């Protein structure tokens, strides 16, 4: 493969990515706005809670918010759906990515992004509930267990497609939330050290 071909493919990929993101943002603007407001309000509230009240309130508040997030995940992935006629599954890893990227399935692309975004607050709040010291392996494990339980429930109750891609996407979203929390946490500690 020549460099010109690689550059062409990369440019084509960027064009498709921008086109897809525009469609996604238009179609899911309310979901994105809700998640952005939820995370920003959580950050502001927890920072305010640290300043105004006892720091002991932070962890219980984070655990309550984590429970709300888990409830929202369960609602959107299990309770919101209607039962189907049979058990459905797809065991090929990254099949949805292949159909999205190479087959042009915009719907699968949106589902992938939704699965990642759905678990982003879970990883963010989980890390805070552990006092900011949640290691990546713990976020990986807990998101994997929750996502696997959801996928098995969807299969058992015939309310969705069991697939490893959803588990991968959910864990990816939780790890992204965990990373963003650690980044923001490190910025906060740097600014506190500079003021001292």
Image (tube, rainbow, N blue to C red):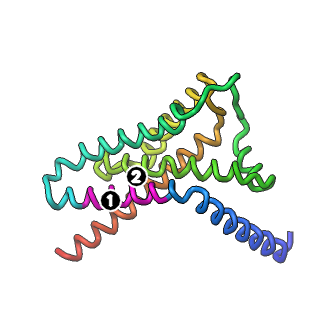
Q: Is residue 87 left or right of residue 72?
A: right
**4, 18: nearer the viewer:** 18
In the image, residue 150 above or below residue 58: above
Q: Is residue 177 left or right of residue 43?
A: right
Q: Is residue 60 left or right of residue 1?
A: left
Magenta segment boundaries in residue numbering: 33-47
Confirm or deny contact between disc 2 and disc 1 (CB under 8 A): no
Crowd class of label 2 (few under 14; some 14 to 19; many from 20; radius 10 Å):
many
Q: Disc 2 and disc 1: Cα gap in Å?
A: 10 Å
| Residue 41 covered by magenta stretch | yes
Tag 2 secondary structure: helix
**Residue 43: assigned label:** 1
Quadrant into which the N terminus falls = bottom right
Q: Which residue is identified by label 2? A: 124
**Residue 106 quadrant:** bottom right
Q: How many badges with numbers are in the image?
A: 2
At a point 31% along the width and 53% down the height, the residue shown is: 132
Tag 1 secondary structure: helix
Quadrant into which the C terminus falls = bottom left
Dominant secondary structure of the residues highlighted in magenta in the image: helix
Which comes sooner in the sequence, label 2 or label 1?
1
At a point 64% along the width and 52% down the height, the residue shown is: 110
At a point 51% along the width and 56% down the height, the residue shown is: 30
**103, 1: nearer the viewer:** 103
**Residue 150: assigned label:** none
**Residue 154 quadrant:** top right
Crowd class of label 1 (few under 14; some 14 to 19; many from 20; radius 10 Å):
some
| Residue 23 covered by magenta stretch | no
Residue 142: x and y in percent read: 45, 38
């Amino acid at each position: 493969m020549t460099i010109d071909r690689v550059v062409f493919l990369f440019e084509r990929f960027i064009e498709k990515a921008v086109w897809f993101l525009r469609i996604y943002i238009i179609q899911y603007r309310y979901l994105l706005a809700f998640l952005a407001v939820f995370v920003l309000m959580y950050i502001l509230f927890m920072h305010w809670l640290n300043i105004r009240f006892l720091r002991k309130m932070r962890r219980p508040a984070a655990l309550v918010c984590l429970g709300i997030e888990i409830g929202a995940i369960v609602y959107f992935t299990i309770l919101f759906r209607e039962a189907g006629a049979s058990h459905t599954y797809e065991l090929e890893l990254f099949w949805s990515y292949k159909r999205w990227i190479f087959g042009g399935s915009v719907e699968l692309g949106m589902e992938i992004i939704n699965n990642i975004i759905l678990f982003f607050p879970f990883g963010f709040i989980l890390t805070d509930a552990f006092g900011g010291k949640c290691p990546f392996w713990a976020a990986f494990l807990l998101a994997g267990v929750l996502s696997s339980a959801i996928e098995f429930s969807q299969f058992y109750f015939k309310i969705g497609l069991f697939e490893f891609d959803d588990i991968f996407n959910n864990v990816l979203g939780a790890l992204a939330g965990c990373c963003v929390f650690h980044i923001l946490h490190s910025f906060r500690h740097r600014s506190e050290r500079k003021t001292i």
